[in-house]
């Protein structure tokens, strides 16, 4: 049986499932229920049919089985009576916990990380995304080989000569997976290099990256801004592969907008790490546009999740604009005014209704203008060899020629300022900053 067959995949058929969570005793019960509902949405996105949900209030999850014996017995009885094939838990379980739970419940057990990995495997379209998903799967699988024992040699080039004296099959499998992980990492490095070269070829075109909690409406907003066809679906992780589209700022400046994979609470750290090249669009962007679904009851928690993830990815050193989307879904427009007062530096839009998109673009222009340094230079014709570098380092706003050379009105972004001054400081006529 191949590795892909052994990896848990709930997409093959609508497996009847239950979801299970531990609520922190004394915590916010309403919020706990809301976050637990998210697990059900994830399960349905993966293709499971959630028949029932179970939760237990504990100070902390139980080490050996996550939940107590009484709750285990309740789930086991329900599973037998209702032909349940799968129990999905709302946390990352240890290999020991999964083994113990499967032994007690006598059905397949999947944790939150495994579920998210399955969804990503379904939605990966490009070679980059597929490679990233497989890398994350390998890293997830490694500590779980005791439970998911299989012969991997046929698929990954093992066989005669691959086993050391006295090696157990699990040790062989681990070595094969480690080899596969290194190969996947090497493949991603090549992809990253190609992506970096592609980004550099854009020159000084300002780039804006959309980030946000999954299903916040980033793809719909991209379509509203760029008027380009992009894939839109009202599901978690509808966008997995990075999408980039051109658009123009109000000044006419060509710009690029990137849509990235949505964030979610408790996202596995190895999954974030393996998707570093996809998220490079956000890391390398000039401006981060944080899209928030304001119609969601717990949008404030979503904001915290995204902010925490951005911090983990070290994407906090550039301008970030918060954009509240789906204002058309609020019960009363008066609420928009309340939120505007609370978030005065944010923009409020409805991407699906095309509301306030012009205001948002004006804000984009303001961000760009604020990050640019304005100069006026005179470049004599005998310095024509510098023109190529001038175009690479600056945005030419206006050019006027005379008999001896050309006057240029320029915008120079902060990251190019040092190199610009090093080459062109002697030609600056008037600093208009």
Image (cartoon, rainbow, N blue to C red):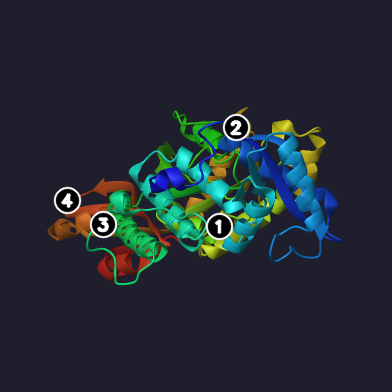
Per the model, the C-alpha gap separating discs 1 and 4 is: 63 Å
Which one is nearer the viewer's eye here, 173 or 198?
173
For mark 2, give the secondary structure.
loop
Which one is nearer the viewer's eye here, 356 or 218?
218
Crowd tier of the residue under label 3, counting other residues whose Cα lies within 10 Å: few below 14, some 14–19, many 20 or above: few
Q: How many marks?
A: 4
- Looking at the image, tell me whether mark 3 or mark 1 is earlier in sequence order: 3
Say which residue label 1 marks: 268
Crowd tier of the residue under label 1, counting other residues whose Cα lies within 10 Å: few below 14, some 14–19, many 20 or above: some
Judged left or right of residue 192, residue 274 is right
Per the model, the C-alpha gap separating discs 3 and 4 is: 77 Å
Q: Is residue 337 visible?
A: yes
Which tag is nearer the camera, tag 3 or tag 4?
3
Which tag is nearer the camera, tag 2 or tag 1?
1
Q: Which residue is depicted at the point 64% across and 60% down?
A: 97
Mark seen at residue 234? 2
Say which residue label 4 marks: 403
- Looking at the image, tell me whether mark 3 or mark 2 is earlier in sequence order: 3
Which tag is nearer the camera, tag 3 or tag 1?
3
Residue lying furthest left in this view? 382
Judged left or right of residue 125, residue 106 is right
Q: Residue 194: where, in percent of width, then height?
A: 28, 52
Q: Residue 28: where, in percent of width, then height?
A: 83, 55
State if disc 4 and disc 3 touch (CB < 8 Å): no
- Looking at the image, tell me whether mark 2 or mark 1 is earlier in sequence order: 2
């Amino acid at each position: 049986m191949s590795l892909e067959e052994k990896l848990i995949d709930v997409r093959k058929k609508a497996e009847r499932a239950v979801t299970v969570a531990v609520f922190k005793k004394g915590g916010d019960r309403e919020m706990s229920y809301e976050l637990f509902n998210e697990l059900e949405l994830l399960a349905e996105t993966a293709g499971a049919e959630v028949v029932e949900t179970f939760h237990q209030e504990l100070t902390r999850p139980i080490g050996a089985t996550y939940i107590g014996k009484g709750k285990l017995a309740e789930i086991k009885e329900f599973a037998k009576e209702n032909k349940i094939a799968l129990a999905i838990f709302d946390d990352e379980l240890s290999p020991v916990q999964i083994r113990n739970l499967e032994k007690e419940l006598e059905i397949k057990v999947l944790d939150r990380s495994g579920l998210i990995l399955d969804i990503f495997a379904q939605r990966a379209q490009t070679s980059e995304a597929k490679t990233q998903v497989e890398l994350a799967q390998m890293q997830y699988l490694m500590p779980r080989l005791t439970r998911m024992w299989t012969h991997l040699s046929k698929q990954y080039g093992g066989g005669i000569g691959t086993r050391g004296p006295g090696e157990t099959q699990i040790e062989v499998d681990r070595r094969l997976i480690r080899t596969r992980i290194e190969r996947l990492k090497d493949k991603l490095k090549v992809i990253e290099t190609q992506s970096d070269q592609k980004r550099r070829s854009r020159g000084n075109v300002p780039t804006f990256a959309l980030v946000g909690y999954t299903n916040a409406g980033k793809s719909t907003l991209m379509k509203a801004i760029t008027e380009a066809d992009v894939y839109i679906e009202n599901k978690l992780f509808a966008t997995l592969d990075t999408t980039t589209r051109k658009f123009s700022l109000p000044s006419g400046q060509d710009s690029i907008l990137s849509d990235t994979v949505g964030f979610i609470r408790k996202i596995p750290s190895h999954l974030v790490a393996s998707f570093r090249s996809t998220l490079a669009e956000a890391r390398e962007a000039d401006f981060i546009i944080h899209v928030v679904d304001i119609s969601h009851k717990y949008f404030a928690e979503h904001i915290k999740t995204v902010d925490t993830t951005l911090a983990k990815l070290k994407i906090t050193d550039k301008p970030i604009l918060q954009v509240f989307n789906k204002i058309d879904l609020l019960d009363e427009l008066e609420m928009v005014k309340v939120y505007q007062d609370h978030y005065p530096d944010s923009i409020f839009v409805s991407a699906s209704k095309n509301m306030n998109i012009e205001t948002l673009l004006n804000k984009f222009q303001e961000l760009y203008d604020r990050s640019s340094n304005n100069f006026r230079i005179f470049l004599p014709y005998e310095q024509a060899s510098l023109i190529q570098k001038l175009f690479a380092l600056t945005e030419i706003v206006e050019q006027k020629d005379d008999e001896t050379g050309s006057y240029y009105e320029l915008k120079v972004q902060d990251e190019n300022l040092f190199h610009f001054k090093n080459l062109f400081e002697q030609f600056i006529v008037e600093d208009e900053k």
